[in-house]
Amino acid sequence: MTRLIKAFALAVSAMLLGLGFAAPASAQATRTWISGVGDDANPCSRTAPCKTWAGAISKTAGGGEIDCLDPGGFGSVTITKSITLDCGGGNGGQAGGILNSGVTGVIINDPNGATTPTLKVVLRNMNINGAGTTVGTYGVRFLSGKSLMLQNVNISNQGTGGAPAVSFEPSSASVGAKLVMSYVNISNTAPTDPTSGNAVQLQSVGGVAVTGLLDHVTITDSAFAVDAEEGATVTVSNSTLSNSYRGVHANATSAHGAVVNLVGVTIANNANFGIASVGTALVRMANTSLVNNVSGMKLAPTAAIQSFGNNLIGANGGNGGANPAPSPISLQ
């Protein structure tokens, strides 16, 4: 009898131990890994990495992180959970990212986007390149959620069909959604029509209030480098917006429904207006250089451009580069 009891106890222990090991195997990991020589059938661990973002994201817990082990183009991805994608190859490295010829690179869409969106996404240390016979459409498209952060990201060769390289278009329930971009370079987003294919566009559904903060951002060869539509308040600092069709475009239908703050920005060599404030939009300028644009500023009768009197404005066509009056007086 004693032997029977011991055998039964050992069997139960083995069963429980087996169950204990089985649970973690089926659980999603907080951090997963991808590699150019990986396989999406793998568990996405460091020693057995997956091959694509899409393959790894299903095995990564919400709020977790996917890291690159080596250079590669790891495919387009649709994100429906809070997550960080980091492709850094060492100190300040650019190991790889996404090749999205003819398609969207990253789509961000909160499953609760119609009611109470909570999704927060970080894209860090990567290239999003749409190069190919047909260049990419959107580099990054944010449809709903709480926030999107881009850090040390290069985006190029986008704009097929007139799509913006970075489109921040939160749902009407995503009130207060935030776009934060730092050390981001965007180029070649108007491949066939210089007036179509914006670099960064903020346009929420229903014009609900959203914000953007762009710091150390360089944009070239786009339609509108920064486009703020109804509901958007955007602050651009320490950045360069050049060699595009238009540097800044602010457009609103309600009083100051779109606001762009420019602090320490160089707007130069654009083929149309350096700054356009249309509808009822407001643009504020401080320590900003507006030079060598075909036309300096476009100002609608009901819009406003305010200057703190410390800007460099000159050598623009059209308006001759006259300095706008100090805030709060607006150009009219």
Image: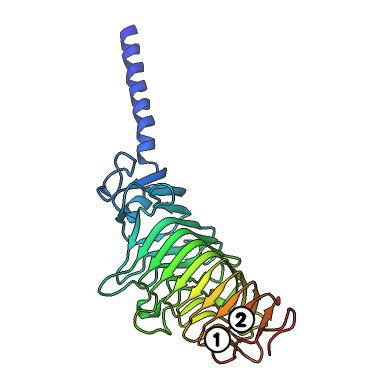
Q: Quadrant of residue 239?
A: bottom right
Three-letter code for the amino acid on which mark 1 is drawn: Asn
Question: Percent position (x, y) of residue 236?
Answer: 58, 69
Q: What residue is drawn where x is 35% and y is 38%?
A: 25
Q: Are marks 2 and 1 in contact (CB under 8 Å)?
A: yes
Q: Residues within 10 Å of mark 2 (few under 14, many from 20)?
A: some
Height in image: 294 above or below 87? below
Q: Quadrant of residue 305?
A: bottom right
Q: Which residue is mark 2?
A: 313
Camera-side residue: 128 or 238?
238
Q: Residues within 10 Å of mark 1 (few under 14, many from 20)?
A: many
Q: Quadrant of residue 147?
A: bottom right
Question: Percent position (x, y) of residue 320?
Answer: 59, 90
- Extreme-top residue of the structure: 2
Question: Percent position (x, y) of residue 220?
Answer: 44, 74
Question: Is residue 1 something one can see in this rendering?
Answer: no
Camera-side residue: 164 or 203?
164
Q: Which residue is mark 1?
A: 316
